[in-house]
Image: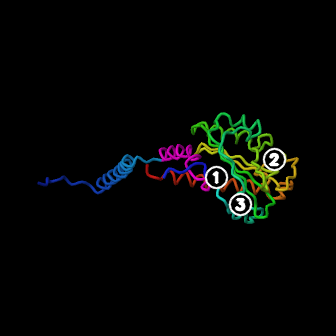
């Protein structure tokens, strides 16, 4: 299963000069040589940090239709040290949504908050833990925004703490015939939303119990993973489920972007 098939993506007498003068001149020449060499190397290769970041950002924009689904949402994800107290986790993919737009994927206020960056494509998959006790939907929203717009949105989320508001939660992806069949809005227990600034992507995850129980007070993953947190989502480790899976999918995304950017055109 894939979101799209990858694109197979006579020497003259010189006056005597003092030792200090010679040393100073040598330093100047050496310094100019180093600077010139660095500049020449940059010009010859056409490489710079800014250019590299720009290329990676542009490459990321098209990944949703140019890489196999397993590159972004692998069948199995290992979460070494991702559980409560540093316990290991293993997540198994149980459902992959068709790539599509963002309609009905977010609560209304979150949809409004994300509107400034647009929605080019949304990719989602749902995982369960090794005991099939928990289910977690992880998503990658590919936006239409440029780096400035992504930075502005990230700043707003950070400054206004939008990622910790329960009325700004992403919605889960439930699939019939899987442990996530009953994973709806009222079953959401913990979540995380990350606005990337080095790619036109918003990454998120939302977790809940696989038995379909409702949750009266969901808790942001950033709070639920704190030592000493006593809420039901925190005690169950659902904050770790959301944060751990989101972190690893985000790492895979960046690795995929790096690999695609390095490929010769």
Residue to which mark 3 is pinned: 92
Question: Can you give x and y, in whole percent of width and height, for residue 234 in the image?
Answer: 82, 56
Residue to which mark 1 is pinned: 250
Q: Is residue 101 magenta?
A: no
Q: Residue at x 76, y 64 (%)?
A: 130
Q: Label 2 to label 1, Cα distance in Å?
A: 24 Å
Q: Is residue 59 magenta?
A: yes
Q: With respect to residue 251, does 104 lie above or below?
A: above
**Mark 1, secondary structure of its residue:** helix
**Mark 3, secondary structure of its residue:** strand
Q: Nearer the viewer, mark 2 or mark 1?
A: 2
Question: Can you give x and y, in whole percent of width and height, for residue 134 in the image?
Answer: 79, 57
Residue to which mark 2 is pinned: 184
N-terminal of the two: label 1 or label 3? 3
Question: Can you give x and y, in whole percent of width and height, for residue 5 in the image?
Answer: 55, 50
Residue 91: quarter of image: bottom right
* Category of crowding for the residue at label 2, using alpha-carbon neighbours closer than 10 angstroms: few (below 14), some (14–19), many (at least 20): some
Quarter of the N terminus within the rendering: bottom right
Question: Can you give x and y, in whole percent of width and height, for residue 26 in the image?
Answer: 31, 54
Magenta span dominant secondary structure: helix
Residue interval drawn in magenta: 49-72
Q: Number of callouts in the render? A: 3
Residue 117: quarter of image: top right
N-terminal of the two: label 2 or label 1? 2
């Amino acid at each position: 299963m894939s979101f799209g098939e990858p694109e197979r993506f006579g020497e003259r007498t010189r006056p005597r000069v003092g030792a200090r003068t010679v040393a100073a001149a040598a330093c100047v020449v050496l310094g100019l040589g180093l600077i010139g060499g660095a500049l020449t190397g940059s010009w010859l290769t056409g490489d710079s940090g800014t250019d590299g970041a720009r290329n990676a950002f542009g490459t990321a924009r098209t990944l949703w239709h140019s890489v196999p689904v397993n590159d972004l949402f692998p069948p199995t994800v290992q979460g070494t040290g991702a559980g409560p107290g540093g316990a290991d986790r293993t997540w198994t993919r149980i459902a992959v949504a068709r790539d599509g737009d963002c309609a009905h994927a977010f609560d209304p206020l979150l949809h409004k908050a994300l509107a400034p960056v647009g929605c080019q494509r949304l990719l989602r998959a749902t995982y369960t833990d090794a005991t099939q006790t928990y289910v977690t939907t992880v998503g990658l929203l590919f936006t239409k925004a440029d780096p400035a717009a992504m930075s502005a949105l990230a700043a707003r989320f950070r400054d206004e703490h939008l990622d910790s508001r329960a009325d700004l939660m992403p919605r889960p992806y439930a699939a019939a015939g899987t442990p996530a069949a009953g994973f709806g809005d009222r079953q959401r227990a913990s979540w995380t939303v990350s606005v990337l600034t080095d790619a036109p992507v918003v990454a998120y995850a939302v977790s809940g119990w696989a038995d379909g129980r409702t949750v009266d007070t969901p808790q942001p993953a950033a709070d639920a993973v704190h030592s000493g947190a006593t809420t039901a989502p925190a005690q169950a480790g659902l904050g770790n489920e959301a944060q751990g899976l989101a972190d690893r999918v985000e790492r895979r995304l960046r690795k995929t972007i790096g690999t695609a950017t390095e490929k010769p055109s």
